[in-house]
Amino acid sequence: MRPTVHDIAERAGVSLATVDRVLNDRPGVRGVTRAKVEAAIVDLGYVRDVAAANLAKSRVYPLVFILPEGDNPFMRGLEDEVRRAGAHSLVERTQLSVVTVPAFDGSALAREIDSAIERAVAGIAAVAVDAPEVLAAIGRAREAGIPFVTLVSDLANSGRDHFIGVDNIAAGRTAGSLMGRFLGQRPGPVAVLAGSMRVRDHGERLEGFLAAMSAMPVSRAILPVLEGQDDPELSFRLIAECLAEVRDLAGIYSLGAGNRGLVRALAAGTGRNLCVIAHEVTDETRAALEGGLVDAVLNQDAGHEVRSAIRVLRAKADGLPVIAAQERIRLEIFIKDNLPSEPGMDDTPGSAGN
Amino acid sequence: MRPTVHDIAERAGVSLATVDRVLNDRPGVRGVTRAKVEAAIVDLGYVRDVAAANLAKSRVYPLVFILPEGDNPFMRGLEDEVRRAGAHSLVERTQLSVVTVPAFDGSALAREIDSAIERAVAGIAAVAVDAPEVLAAIGRAREAGIPFVTLVSDLANSGRDHFIGVDNIAAGRTAGSLMGRFLGQRPGPVAVLAGSMRVRDHGERLEGFLAAMSAMPVSRAILPVLEGQDDPELSFRLIAECLAEVRDLAGIYSLGAGNRGLVRALAAGTGRNLCVIAHEVTDETRAALEGGLVDAVLNQDAGHEVRSAIRVLRAKADGLPVIAAQERIRLEIFIKDNLPSEPGMDDTPGSAGN
DNA sequence: CTGTTAGCGCGTTCAC
DNA sequence: GTGAACGCGCTAACAG
């Protein structure tokens, strides 16, 4: 049996309460006493039983996820993952809730953040929008002592506690490398479809993509960026036009969420042999990959991101350190052959998390 | 507050003990009483607090991982992950231990399995070797009611409860697809370096690779398989010879663990422009990827596998169902640009495991 | 400053 | 068949 608080109380010749005070770093213990207890702790190699501690505390941690609304499949997937985590989270004394706000709307996001502060939640995770109101709201959350993490799209200068998402410059580089290698010697320009250059992750992906493409042995023209506002209809029109006008088009990099429109346009422009790379595995991109319309999909695992956010917020709420290496979100590459057959995945941190 | 056993007892008009009997499906409850309790359970939407349950049980689950010994970096990585999980596992009342046996030695493995059965462990995870003794030993474990999972390399007809690892045929296909696309129109044959065709995962990878290569638009010769026994020295010699003899070699697929020798030979044969694809991210393959000697590395995340094995064994030990989709191990593709900077990763299942 | 005591939600003897 | 009472390891009120 591993040592308990009783063992260290006995060994140090003090009571349980004193041990508890030392363990939780609370005031009201003399230096000498504290030292004795600490010695006993290391002697016995004591490790706190978190489950029992949480049980005793019976404290719940209300965490809020603020996500953009609309039919962006990736965001809806994120939302699903939060709900899924919610099922298991009761065990861990975490109470998850999701609120959605209009996409790209800084003041709406700021309002929702303030509302969460008002409700005195234990932590906030949000997909950041680059706007001064948001910066200010994050500042208020921090002032109120509420942990704040940015999700998917960062706002590094906001003072947020942590960013949870992929390195988008590296993502762009990866796309560029794959595009370059898949195309090889084949001539022709490449088109880029983005949502909007006003959001940071899209800008960063483009930056990485251009860098990787220009580092390729074969130099290749990149057409001016098409901004589809992550809207299926607009994206469809832009791609369809591009296909019609640029007869020798060699490839398309879709770095935003307008993939439904993209795929529709690709399906229409049959017979064209293009190299297409997109982001995020969704129903559309999965089908397109399987059908050969898309060659590779880069992905960030929404489940991992949600669980990581929960772990980080809880750690911050408890004043515990975060193991950065453990919370790094990987950029996954999928081609037709390694696509997982079903949506769901991972653990637990569920397990301890995944 | 969510409902507890007390609430159920009150609502059903019975005592705690009766509720407990119903919850744990134990005898000694009349049909009517049972029905009342069950009604109360669904009415209140009760979900058992596993943490509290485990606390009360104070039962520990000793689990054993049996891994091949030797300097196979992937296996040593697996071992590290077990130890890492061991740190967090105390919380979950799981006691992990690792034993190593000579690689490819069926009778040694069988002996170790029997030893674990003797010690009455709560579950066994092992990298299977395809031998009749192993089959028999797994049968004895099952007879003793001890859950058994195969890790990395399967033995489907053994009656094991579960296999934890990647689909190796799909892994081979993925390698073939990438190889074909990276090479494009470029002529020249491709070499395959394996450990030994006597282990199933290697055979399966080869099968998938050949299938994908033959499905490519450009047909390409595949040289006879080189068997390096996962030995660095032998692998080095085989590859060096091959490089010397086949002047127009276009690519190499290394599907086993002889990567140290491979990389050494590649570094020596400088100036050759080859497409090289290997398995498992280790120090060697990581460096080779960064240095441009290797083009892509396929990987199975050892941390995920270990945590999955733990979850599955515990579930089986408790007679709980396993969510197959959640336990599927993904095949990861890494190129230079999406290589994670450091080894560590994920959660927990810790909770979840991620 | 320190110790006592009563739970947290559940499982498990024992008696009835 | 059923119920009351105790303990798992820890925290949080109280006293002292």
Image: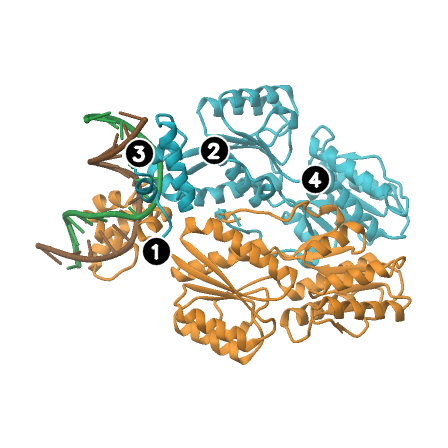
Chain colours: A orange, B cyan, C green, D brown
Q: Identity of the amino acid at label 1?
A: Arg
**Residues tagged by mark 2 and mark 4 found on one chain of the structure:** yes
Q: Disc 1 on helix, strand or loop?
A: loop
Q: Which chain is indicated by disc 4?
A: B
| Residue at mark 1: chain | A
2 or 3: tag closer to the N-terminus = 3
Q: Is residue A64 visible?
A: yes
The kind of residue tagged 4 is Gly
Q: What residue did someone put label 1 on?
A: A59
Residue most extreme to the bottom: A132
Give the residue type that dot 3 points to: Ala
* Disc nearest the viewer among 3 and 4: 3
Rounded to the nearest angstrom, the CA distance separating label 2 from label 1 is: 32 Å
Q: In percent of the image, x 19 and y 59: which residue is there?
A: A30
Which is nearer the N-term, disc 2 or disc 4?
Answer: 2
Residue A331 placed where, x, y %? Answer: 64, 57
Task: Look at the numbered discs 2 and 3 and tell me whether their residues touch, using CB distance below 8 Å.
Answer: no
Q: Which residue is mark 2?
A: B63
Please report, as a chain letter, where disc 2 is located. Answer: B
Using the rendered view, name the quadrant where residue D6 is placed: top left
Q: Is residue B84 above or below residue A269?
A: above
Whole-number angstrom distance, CA of label 3 to CA of label 1: 26 Å
Q: Residue at x 78, y 56 (%)?
A: A294
Q: CA distance from mark 4 to mark 1?
A: 52 Å
Do tag 2 and tag 4 residues touch (Cβ < 8 Å)? no
Numbered mark located on residue B258 in the image:
4
